[in-house]
Image (cartoon, rainbow, N blue to C red):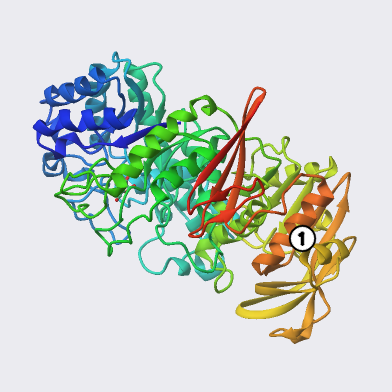
Amino acid sequence: MRIGVDYYPEQWDETMWEQDADRMKEIGVEIVRVGEFAWSRMEPTEGVYDFAWLDRVVQIFTDREIDLVLCTPTCTPPQWAFEKYPEIIQVGADGAKIPIGIRGHRCVTNATYRRLCEKIIQALVERYHDNPRIIAYQIDNEVEANHCRCEECTQGFRAWMQKKYGTPQAVNAAYRNTVWSGEYSSWEEVKPPTAGVLQWQNPSLTLDYNRYASDSIVDYIEFQRQCIRKWDATVPITTNNWFCENMPDFYDLFEHLDFVSYDNYPLSVLPEDEESLYSHAFHLDLMRGIKQQNFWIMEQLSGAMGSWMPMSPTPRPGMIRGYAAQAFAHGADTVLHFRWRTACSGAEMYWHGILDHNNVPGRRYREFAELCSWAKKWKEAEGAVIQNEVAILYGSAQEYAFKLQHQAEGMYYLEQLKLFHDAFTSIGVGVDIINETASLEQYRIVIAPTLLITNEEVKDHLYHFAEDGGSVVLTNRCGVKDSYNCCIMQALPTVYEELAGVRVEEYDAIGSHEHDLQLCDSAWKQVHGEQSAKAMQWCDILAPTTAKTMAVYGPKGFSLFYGGRAAVTCNEYGEGRAYYVGTVMNRSAYHSLAQTIVEETGVSYRNDLPPGVEVTVRKKGQKSWTFVFNNTMHSQKIWTGDVLQPFEMQVYPEK
Ligand code: GLA
Ligand code: ZN
């Protein structure tokens, strides 16, 4: 494993650079990321470049055999650029230009902005590409789907719509625009959804707009990738990814990039209810699943987070070492910590780095130094891969559509995925989170939560997967809509009825109410240890056609009128089977269901993991490494007899 740091030399007096680099070298830092926001230092006025300082920085690290990640600084255009070319400023949903002085507030489609980007990228890459210490490029910083409403982006949306539909009449037909006199008679009438409550807009339009916004940022990333490739044909290129409000489609974003990198800020205080203990692992598994390859952490938690919010508690002892090791266990061979030293100026001065403002090595620094040494012990495991038999499907359109039209109080798309991820993780079964359209060949169990928006390719994959002997898990809210975000006029789960062997007779969005659930499948009941569980948030009242019933709504609770009706079923289909979970259950019911499914499918698992302890296995040739991580605040004894301290990682190599 390789450990690095994010470093902003332009924010420090030049006299500190060598001391910083010496310290890094001394504790074993192998990589630094530089250049991210330094456009104004690289190009102080238009066309006038100053790379002398960066030459010295690159030389300092090169001399110490520390590798570099070079960033395109395009997330923060210089002030002169905004002054000279106000057209490059992003326009908000209210039609007004976004106030400048921060970052990320440029229009990524604007031709002038792109010309400026191209020139700075050329200057940078031409100058440094020959240095073998430059091991990767990072494009921009944490991009979001492009929601700019300037004239150019509005035209871009229209062109995107024209390409997809051909005529306004075809849009009307797809969206069924007779509602609220929404019919278009010319392309000029087709506009991005405007300000106000998004939920009052046509959901077909908002979903397409989000697809366009994603395509548009992907186009920008591809533009930068090509700029880099003109001057450097080989060094790998990435962009640093995160979870944000306007998420682009992850799979499209990284399609042409060489590897995925992710900004990982796990919690410094764990929730008491344990419900989200495994959510860090969830995010890591999702990142690995984007390209179904190992990935990098480009920014990793190093200290208290804060600045535009009150400061978070500082990372507890063990977290700096443990969370980085956890990322490694989930397929990140390289982890860069954000940041070397906490900024003394600027808006982000309370987002803490490894070193505090005082520049005196402290507790976190010492723990980070330990991490650097620990990482060197596991060099051999670099490049080892994770091969799982269980996959959870994620869909960008699903997430967006679910978010836009909240299905029931307390019910969120990613949470539905996490419930299953948590269940399999808790029994030591590794899970890949992959694009819903990805090939399912390598898997034996595929969980497809809330397939709200129907996609023909996904549907075909799932039918074939079950036919060929796989176990599919479908849930409530599947088959609800067509790809235009209009409801399908057919009994739910519509196109999935044959696979699931059930019909939804009626549904009940019970939100925060609860209902009693009675397990009637003997295997599940036995694993669960009791007959009762809970139904929450959503209840499909199921009429099985060919499926057998695994659980029914009980006589107690909020929804008395469907007591005795099926809630969870299993249908033999082809050589395999399809489970249908019509409700949202309590955590232990997912755990026991996961165990029942792996037993029925013949996937191996563990039933001796203490809560909050994760196991992952990475393989390389004949060798494998089993990683066991204690993601809790308590020490935990594991099956080997070892006691793991809070956030401790143990690695067990095998030949
Ligand atoms: C993000 C950004 C960084 C920094 C950190 C912490 O991850 O990429 O530049 O702003 O958040 O605030
Ligand atoms: Zn724009």
Q: How many numbered tags mark residues here?
A: 1
The image quadrant of residue 567 is: bottom right
Q: Is residue 609 left or right of residue 112?
A: right
Q: Residue at x 17, y 21 (%)?
A: 55
Task: State whether residue 654 is above or below residue 276.
Answer: above
Residue 99 visible? The answer is yes
Q: Position of residue 71 (x, y in %)?
A: 29, 32
Task: State whether residue 10 is above or below residue 478.
Answer: above
Residue 162 visible? The answer is no
The image quadrant of residue 23 is: top left
Q: Which residue is mark 1?
A: 580
Q: Residue at x 27, y 21 (%)?
A: 125
- Which amino acid type is marked by label 1? Tyr
Q: Position of residue 160 (x, y in %)?
A: 46, 43
Q: Is residue 76 left or right of residue 434?
A: left
The image quadrant of residue 174 is: bottom right
Task: State whether residue 213 is above or below residue 58.
Answer: below
Element carrying mark 1: strand
Q: Position of residue 77 (x, y in %)?
A: 20, 40
Task: Name the image quarter holding the C terminus.
Answer: top right
